[in-house]
Image (spheres, rainbow, N blue to C red):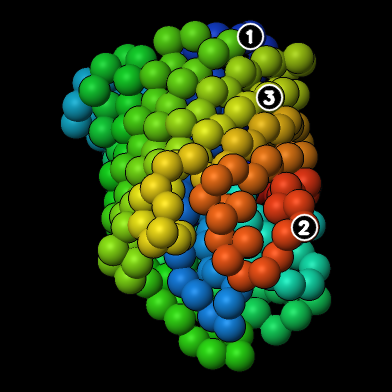
Amino acid sequence: MFHCIRISPYFASRSDFDMAALKPFILSTLSVLSLTCVSNGWANENLVQTEGVSSGVLPTSTAERAINLDLGWDSKYVSQGRNNLEHGGIYWMNASVEYGNLTTYALVGRGDSQAYTEWNIGLEYALHFSEDVEAHVGYQRIEGYSNSRCQDNELFAELAYNAVTWLVPSASYVYSTEAAGYFIELSLHSYWQLSERFILAPYITQGLDFKYRTEDHNGRNHLQFGLEVNYDLADNMSLGGHISHSIAQADIEQEATANGDFSSQDQTYAGIHFNISF
């Protein structure tokens, strides 16, 4: 996806603070996908976000089609607690088409200070188990280009329980065919609508690596926390951003030590994006 936490919400302005209205925003910020692909020692990961459709029971589908365009920039390219580029940040452009429960998307990232390009093309299906429990499953193809080329195929799944906006637990799972491993993220988000158009969302995420990034260690990878914001410029346009801090845990620290790097592996970064829907 993505989802290292980027906001890609479609949340039209509303005059009241109600759960049904917030669900599309919640699901979009919880859709954190990861990928892996190594090129010259710099991994190629990304998080892709797509919007969920709030509805009743599985497998309810809406008939309306929506097209979304998201433009963004991150000060660092961080995923699974690691900075994936040696220099600078990364620009993003994501285009997605939603029809009912199905979303198809194409995302491209380009380094702002070094030669690096990444493509993510995939599809995602929304599952509505109940009013408060929703999930996504999907597939994506990844192509990365730097001094050499890398590619991967990934299967992913996400689950969120959004009965109350002030505490939304979620879990995401991604399996890499290239690495033959998987990565799990367990998150808590708290959504606060401070005005008709402005939403504030602090979050915390625990990442667990199982042969996805490293083969020698399974378990705790990183602990990340941060703050996401979103402001509706119009009913179909929004401006969002985030600031995040990632604390390296055993998986990252052991990998760095094995590579002769004994410096701190913690990461702090921020990002901004603009979203429009048609």
Compute the Cα span from label 3 to label 2. 28 Å
Compared with 45, 134 (above or below) is above
Compute the Cα span from label 3 to label 1. 21 Å
Q: Nearer the viewer, mark 3 or mark 2?
A: 2
Task: Estimate how packed mark 1 is, as few (under 14), some (14 to 19) or many (20 or more) residues with alpha carbons within 10 Å.
Answer: few
Which mark is on residue 16?
A: 1
- Where disc 3 sits, the SS reads strand
Q: Residue at x 67, y 69 (%)?
A: 260
Q: Earlier in the sequence, mark 3 or mark 1?
A: 1
Whether residue 277 can be seen here: no
Q: Residue at x 33, y 26 (%)?
A: 134
Q: Residue at x 58, y 11 (%)?
A: 166
Name the residue type under label 1: Asp
Whether residue 171 can be seen here: yes
Name the residue type under label 2: Ser
* Marks 3 and 2 in Cβ contact (< 8 Å): no
Q: Image quarter for residue 82?
A: bottom right
Q: Earlier in the sequence, mark 3 or mark 2?
A: 3
Q: Nearer the viewer, residue 243 or 254?
A: 254
Which mark is on residue 263?
A: 2
Q: Nearer the viewer, mark 3 or mark 1?
A: 3
Q: Is residue 187 left or right of residue 78?
A: left
Which residue, given by chain and number where applicable, does mark 3 sit on? 202
* In the image, farthest residue toward the left: 59
Task: Estimate how packed mark 3 is, as few (under 14), some (14 to 19) or many (20 or more) residues with alpha carbons within 10 Å.
Answer: some
Can you give x and y, in whole percent of width and height, for residue 187 in the image? 51, 29
- Where disc 1 sits, the SS reads loop
Q: Nearer the viewer, residue 174 or 209?
A: 209
Can you give x and y, in whole percent of width and height, for residue 191 in the image? 62, 19
Name the residue type under label 3: Pro
Q: Is residue 74 left or right of residue 64?
A: right
